[in-house]
Amino acid sequence: MKNIFYLNIILLFNINLVLAQVNVVNQASSGVIGDVDKGEYEGNLKDGLYHGKGKLSFKDGRIYEGEFVEGLRNGYGVFTTSNGEKYEGDWKDNYKHGNGTQVFSDGGVYEGQFQFSKPHGNGKMKFNTGDEYTGQFNNGAINGSGKMVYNNGNIYEGKFKNWKPHGQGTLTLPDGTKMSGDWKKGKLKG
């Protein structure tokens, strides 16, 4: 009877030791994981998920290098595509979220706040045409107060709605002429 008791204690101890080792491996490790759909991940893992710093290379040439939390892009990271686009900044649950800089494939650049992968809040957009906007964005569009410097020398300061002057604002021409008033869909009313 004593032997069975001691045998049970030894077995219980060994099982706990094995479980503890498995738990340590699952909590913090690193390695390379290949995935048929996504491509390849190299970096830290926790409980089998991307966690900590890592690099995720997609089969189509996209690359994310940065921080992960429980399998999702969270924290600071850099995302590049094969067509020249690049985002560098904050992420939340796989979305561009917080402050960042987006370089577009056409050469345009947005620098500012993001919400759910869209410009939202205060930011600055340099268009490939040479136009430059500084001001408020809402859900990916120019909406709110801002200043647009056009490549022809015109400068508009005031309210915008859906990318166009809309509301109170002033357009200053290169010769200094000012046109102020209420704008609607890009045109001065009156």
Image (cartoon, helix red, strand yellow):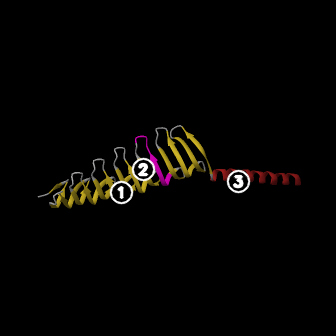
Q: Is residue 76 magenta?
A: yes
- Measured from the top left, where is residue 79 in percent x and y? 45, 48
Is residue 14 visible in the rendered image? The answer is yes
- Residue holding disc 2: 87
Asked whether 116 or 84 is in front, the reply is 84
Residue at position x 33%, y 48% in the image:
108
The boundaries of the magenta stretch are 73-83
Q: Give the residue displayed 22% in from the left and 57% down from the top.
A: 155
Does the magenta run of residues contain 71?
A: no
User: Which is more N-terminal, label 2 or label 3?
Assistant: 3
Crowding at mark 1 (Cα within 10 Å: few <14, some 14-19, many 20+): many
Q: Locate residue 94 relative to residue 152 in the image: left or right.
A: right
Judge by depth and name the residue closer to the eye, 75 or 176. Answer: 176
Q: Nearer the viewer, mark 3 or mark 2?
A: 2
Depicted 65 relative to depicted 147: above or below: above
On residue 120, which mark appears?
1
For image coordinates 34% across by 58% down, the residue present is: 123
Q: How far apart, in angstroms, are the residues tagged by discs 3 and 2?
A: 40 Å
State the image coordinates of residue 19 (x, y, percent, origin top left): 71, 51
Is 70 above or below relative to 157? Answer: above
Image coords of residue 104 (percent x, y): 36, 47
Q: Is residue 72 left or right of residue 176?
A: right
In the displayed structure image, the side of residue 180 where residue 13 appears, left or right: right
- Of labels 1 and 2, earlier in sequence is 2
* Amino acid beneath label 1: His
Inspect the image, locate mark 3, and give the three-letter code of the amino acid beneath it: Ala
Q: Nearer the viewer, residue 43 or 3?
A: 43
- Of tags 1 and 2, the one toward the viewer is 2
Q: Amino acid at mark 2?
A: Tyr
